Every structure is written in structure tokens, then in C-alpha cells.
Image: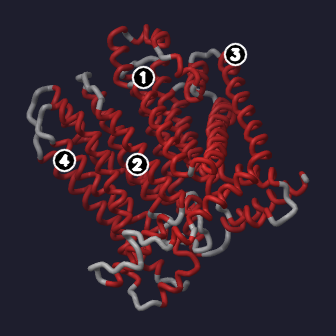
Amino acid sequence: MRETFFHILRYKFRAFLKSTFEWKWVSIVRGLGSLLVFGGFSIGAYALSFAVTKFLLGNVQVGLYVFHRFLSMMFFTLFIAVNLGNIIVSYSTLYRSAEVNFLFTKPVPYAQVFVLKFLDNFLYSSATLFLVTFTALLGYGSYLNYPWYAYVVVMAFVLVPFMFLAACLAVLILMAIMKLAGRIGFRQVMALLAGFYVVLIALFFRYSNPVRLIEFVNQVGPGFADQLRFFEPTFLSYLPSHWAANILFSFARGEVARAFLQTGGLLFATAAAFGVVLVIGSAFYYRSWLVSMHVAARSNDPAHLNRIRKFDFRKVSALPRQLEVLLKREYFMFFREPSQWIHLIVMVVLTMVFALSVGNLNLRLRVTEIQLLTYLVLFAFAGFLSCSVALRFLFPMSSLEGNVFWVIRSAPIETWKVYLIKLILGFILVLVLAQVVAVVTNVPFAKFSGRRPMLLWFGIYSAWWVALAASSINLGLGTYFVNYAEKNPIRLASTQGATLTFLFTLFLLLVIVAIVILPLNEYFLTLFTFKPFKMNVIVAPGTVLAVLSMLITVLGIQVGLKSMQRDF
């Protein structure tokens, strides 16, 4: 049976190579664009990581221990992102995939199907994060003068097992979800899961406040910052993010033996988790697949289908007939796939947790560099959220039309109307979340400054343009790299074209940060020197931001419309 496993794995790899390097214009553009954007993004991420490391260790002198507590927060965010991403992607990969249905009709053991789809899911959902973590590692290690082999060791034996552990836990959680869903209902289980993650994230950030760390350094001095470990809550030491940060901390201090011992602990935990995944997957995967089929059958129950909903094709509204039909079909296309609304709920929950955490942020440090860095981090996170939501929900929109898109193309309706409806609905979704984050991240600074809420209005203004540009370019390039044969929106958002689009939007975000950094620095500088701030300083960067966003929007719309009008 082992031969069957490697036979399937070999042909999956060959299929990936053929689809990636096929000689088509779209594939060539995607490959060259990926090379350029990946290269530019890698250079930018390296420079940013090096600059932040140099700033905190060289300028602010927070000390190695406090700096690695910051890294622990970053690792925690990465762990949660990989974990939640794998939970959502695993549902589609393990239970909704046509390949699984095909393999179940062949003499392939269920355990082998499970392992194949698990590895497939991990690579699809974590490829971009691998690039981000590796380039950040290069910038961090360059400042600390790591030798070349240290990067290989840390990446292979720390970061990859760390992310693989998050994926293993995600699959175990998904198995538990499917087990409970057959008894108490799918929605009730998802509500319990959302509550668990809200409590976990809220507790972590309550006891890991970055401002409190810097205040402690200012009080006791960098030389005594290592004593902070004695005041940390005990539960933090059980988190994988804490293990990874401690390994890098030991490496940075030259304690190689201790670092290898900690690395051995992480590898053992990852191997144990993978072993548990194999045992539970072998015993329960097929039964959980049957549970998923039962849950799907409940939604297609005739009594359920015959119930008239508020937003139904059998109801007539006051809207024009074509507009009404287009809105309703977009609504049902979105909610017919559970991974869509589940992922949306997760994004909303995480946004609310972040909003509550930032809303209680205490900005007592009257240091221009610290205030500027804190604001830029929050500003960049708001932009990153907009880019992530646009990638996840707008990029797959055109592909989800499927092979029946010929019905729309042959109908007496103009293509630009279909495209415009998609853009408007997606933009509203991205804009709402972006504005929530923009408001909550600017309110603490507005309260702290005591001035007119200029930063608040600037945050709302910039969130509008970032959301518009991210929505337009994701829908446009998603239509250019369209794949009508793929029905899984998460796999569509993990393709090479999606990665290229995401990196392009991140590069755009870096350009926007570069545009606004000088006026923001002037704002905080005048704030702490008690000088008046000239409003015209922000006018030119704001105008450049608006013009750049409009150009990206026009480009995205043109690319999307031309792509949608190609031969089907």
C-alpha cells in the first residue's frame, strides 16, 4: 500500500509542475510577475525586519529578552494565523474536495487519503507565510551576525516544525468539530470554537502588552530587563510561540547547547502531535467524512428548501429585475459554501478582539520614535487586514462562477454590470472591517494627543483608499487568473496567482507607509515639543495616496473587465 501512496504523491507533484510551467500567456505573466513581486517583497521584508531589529536593540536598547518577548507575540500571531487558516482550509480539502470523492472510489486506504490531503492542505495554506517568516529571519539574523548555516537550522528545525505543529492542532480541532457537529449541531460547535479563540487571544494580549514591556525597560534599565521573566504568567511558558522565541533568545545569547535542547523539545512536541493526527485520522477520518455528508444533506432537506427566506428568488423587490437577480445570486453563491461564511465569522471575531485590545492601549511614553513606531505598526496591520480580506473574498469571486458562467455570458445582460456588482459588494465588506480597525487604532492616539482628532480622520480617509485599491486589484487579477474548474474558494485564494496578487498589495501597502511616514513623524514631533502642527504637511501625502489608489483601481477594473470578456 505504500507504493500507492508514493504513486499518488508523484503524480500530484507532476501535475503541479505542468500547471505551473505551462506555456500560456497567463502562466508566463504569472510566473514573471511572481518572480518580480516575490523578489521585491523579499527585499522589502528583509529591510523592514533589519530596521525594526536595529531600532529596538540599537536605538531604544530594549535588551535581548524584551526583544524576544516581542518576537513571542509575533510567533503567537503567526501560530494563530496558521492554525485558523488550516482549520478552515482543511474542511474544504478533507471533506469538500472532488479529489477525495474520487480516491474513495479507488483501492486506496482512507488513512493514505487523509495524509495526502493533510500535507496538501498544509502546503497550500502556509506557502506565503513561509516566505514572510524566512525573509524576516534574514533581517533579524543579519543584525545579530548569524552565520549562513544558522538560517538553515532555524528555518528547518524551528520555524517549519512550529508551523507544522499549528497545522496538526488545526486538524485535531477540525476532527473534534466534526465529532461534535453530528451530536449538537455545526453552528453550535462553531460558536463554542469562536468563544475559545476569543478568550485565548484576549488573555494572551492582556498579559503581553508591548507598551508595558518598554515601560519596564525604562524603569529598571536594559541591563535588568532579563528579570522580566520572573514576572510573566505561568501559562505563557506552555505556548509554542514562547518555545520558538526562547530558542532564538538562546541562540542570540550564544547558549547553543540550551538552544538545541529547546529545539529538541519543539521537535518532540511536533512529532507527537503528528503521531496523534495519524492515529486519529486513521481511525476517524472516514466516519467524520460521513458526518460531513450528513451535515450537508441536512441543509438540502426539502422542508428546509421550501421555507421562504427574506432574501429569496421567489420574492420580488422594488429593485430593477436584473439588479435584483444579480444581488441575490451573489448572496447565494457566497453562503452556499460553508467555508465562506465560517471564514468571514473568524475574520470578524479576530477584528473585534483586536479592537478591544487596542481600545485599552495606554500610551504613556512620551517618546516620538516609540509613538511613531506603535502607530505605524497599527496602521500597517489595518492595511494588512484589508489586503487579506480582499484576497480571501474578492480574488475567488469570478472563479466561483464555475463552468456554468456561459449562462451569464449568453444572457441579455452586460458583463460590466456583473463585474460592478461583485466589486461593490466586495468593497463594502472590506471597507466595513477596515473602517472598524481604522477607528479603534486611532482613538487611543486621539485621546492621548488632546488635539483635534486629525489622526482619526486621517485613519478613516486612508482606510477608504486602501480598501478601494485592495478590492479593485484583487478582483481584477482574480478575474485575470480565473480558474472556473476549481470550486474551493480557499484553494483559489492560495494559488500562485493569488500569492502574486497578495504580495503586490503588500508592496502597495509598504509604498503607502513610506508616503505617510514623514508627516506622521512631524505630527508626533510637534506633539511632544508643544509646537503647532501645520495641516498642509498632510495634504500632499494624502493627495498622493488618493491618486495612487485611483490609478490602482482603474487598472484593476480594466484588467478585470477585459479578462471577463475573454472566450469562455
Crowding near the residue tagged with mark 2, few <14, some 14–19, many ≥20 C-alpha atoms within 10 Å: few
Whether residue 385 is situated above or below residue 371 in the rendered picture: below
Alpha-carbon span between mark 1 and mark 4: 31 Å
Q: Who comes first in sequence, dot 2 or dot 3?
A: 3
The residue carrying pointer 1 sits among few (fewer than 14), some (14 to 19) or many (20 or more) residues within 10 Å by Cα, namely few
Q: Which residue bears the numbered disc 4?
A: 457
Under mark 3, the amino acid is Ala
Q: Measure the C-alpha gap from mark 3 to mark 4.
A: 52 Å
**Which mark lies nearer to you, 3 or 4?**
4
N-term-proximal mark, 1 vs 3: 1
Q: In this view of the protein, which residue sits in the foreground, 463 or 361?
A: 361
Q: In this image, 196 relative to 212: left or right?
A: right
Q: CB of mark 4 within 8 Å of CB of mark 2?
A: no
- Disc ID at residue 257: 3
Residue lying furthest left in this view?
Answer: 532
Mark on residue 207? 1
Three-letter residue code for mark 1: Tyr
As displayed, is residue 543 above or below residue 47?
below
Residue 72: x percent and y percent?
A: 51, 27
The part of the image, by quadrant, that contains residue 369 is top left
Q: Earlier in the sequence, mark 3 or mark 4?
A: 3
Name the residue: 58% across, 40% down.
134
Residue positioned 29% across, 39% down in the render:
441
Rendering coords of residue 523 (x, y %): 18, 36
Mark 4 residue element: helix
The label number, if any, that marks residue 348 in the structure image: 2
Residue 145 in view in this figure: no
Q: Nearer the viewer, residue 302 or 525?
A: 302
